[in-house]
Amino acid sequence: MNKQIDYIKEYDNLIVITNGELSDNHTNDNFEVVSVKADNDKISNYYSKALKNDIKPGEEVIFIKQKQSTDEKLQVVYVYEGDKKTNEHIIIVNNKFSKLNLVENRISIDVKSHQVYSIVEVFVGDESSFDYIVFNDLCEGVESKIHRYSKVMRNAVYNCAFAELSEGNTIADNYTSLAETGSSCDSKVVTIVKGDKVQNFDINITHDAKNTSSNNLNRAVVDEDGSAIFNAIGFIAKGFNQSKCHQDSKMLTLSENAKSECNPILLIDEYDVEASHAAAVGQLDEESLYYLQSRGLSKQQCEKLLIYGFLMPVAEVIESEDLKEKFISNITKKLNL
């Protein structure tokens, strides 16, 4: 196994996907991991329930299924190596009455120019829970488009936290359907943008049943000539009453040339619901900086601490203390704290 993968390997259950192909599978009998054609019987049952209907006949799909409930962590590492274009399609299935903790890492090796087009579909079964933690740490030469489609079934809980720490341009669409009664989604996104790079996120949560709930919290720190966009979209259709949809998006700009755009969008077609949104774009609070400097810290130390505090609410979605510590560690490392 590559030394860089060894360095980030955290758990015994490990899947490695290199340039879109399944290259290593180190999982136990609690998981099924196969690379099959899209029309294979192994995935046809789940794909008929999935969100996308434009699957290509004969397309290669990496299928990851949790066969039984376990407290074990599953780690999936996406590796992009060399200069090329990568297309990949992954389906992750969490069966009913089960709990899944999944950590996703994306890294690049020996890359000057690499284009990534990635589709990841998540199916969260009835009465189950899924903690999905993502760390993207790709180099400047990787331009990525990542589309995530998640479907959450009856009384299921879907907690997801995405840390976009890559140095290249990224476009990410996170679409979640709360498909049946009692389903819920707690979504968090954090990004740090530097140089002249662009990070764009569409976070779309659709309430497709009664008594569903969603919370969406987004944080961005933009420096130098970087640019970040959050489009947070919540939709409750007519007839899906007693649903709750809340958004909170905030962005910090650390330089005059940094560009931030925050678009909170609520589409509500029902009266008997709860819905709210908050959005803010600004700079570090001068009074807080002054107070911390009066305690003997340098201005740079104060800025890093304030940024750290600004980003940390994203970690609250994570139930597992182990995964929460890993999430905070990655943010701390990126901020050089």
Image (cartoon, grey):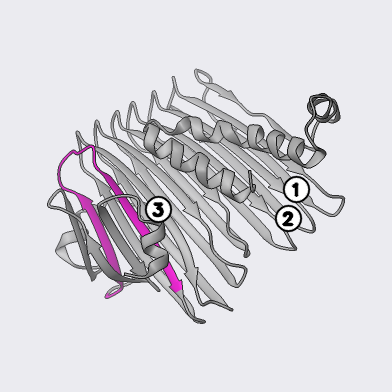
- CA gap between label 1 and label 3 equals 26 Å
Q: Which residue is mark 3?
A: 104
Q: Which residues are magenta?
A: 58-80
Residue at the far left in the pictured view: 29
Quadrant location, the N terminus = bottom left
User: Mark 2 falls on what kind of element?
Assistant: strand
Sequence-first disc among 3 and 2: 3
> Does residue 279 show up?
yes
- CA gap between label 3 and label 2 equals 24 Å
Which circle, 3 or 2, is nearer the viewer?
A: 3
Judge whether residue 214 is colored magenta: no
Q: Which residue is mark 2?
A: 227
Above or below — where is 56 with respect to 261?
below
Judge whether residue 68 is colored magenta: yes
Label 3 crowd (10 A; few <14 / some 14-19 / many >=20): some
Quarter location, residue 224: bottom right
For badge 3, the amino acid type reads Glu
Residue at the far front in the pictured view: 296
Quarter location, residue 94: top left
Q: Which residue is mark 1?
A: 260
Q: Main secondary structure of the magenta part?
A: strand
Circles 1 and 2, Cβ within 8 Å, touching? The answer is yes
For badge 1, the amino acid type reads Ser
Q: How many marks?
A: 3
Label 2 crowd (10 A; few <14 / some 14-19 / many >=20): many
User: Mark 3 falls on what kind of element?
Assistant: strand
Label 1 crowd (10 A; few <14 / some 14-19 / many >=20): many
For badge 2, the amino acid type reads Ser
> Does residue 54 show up?
no
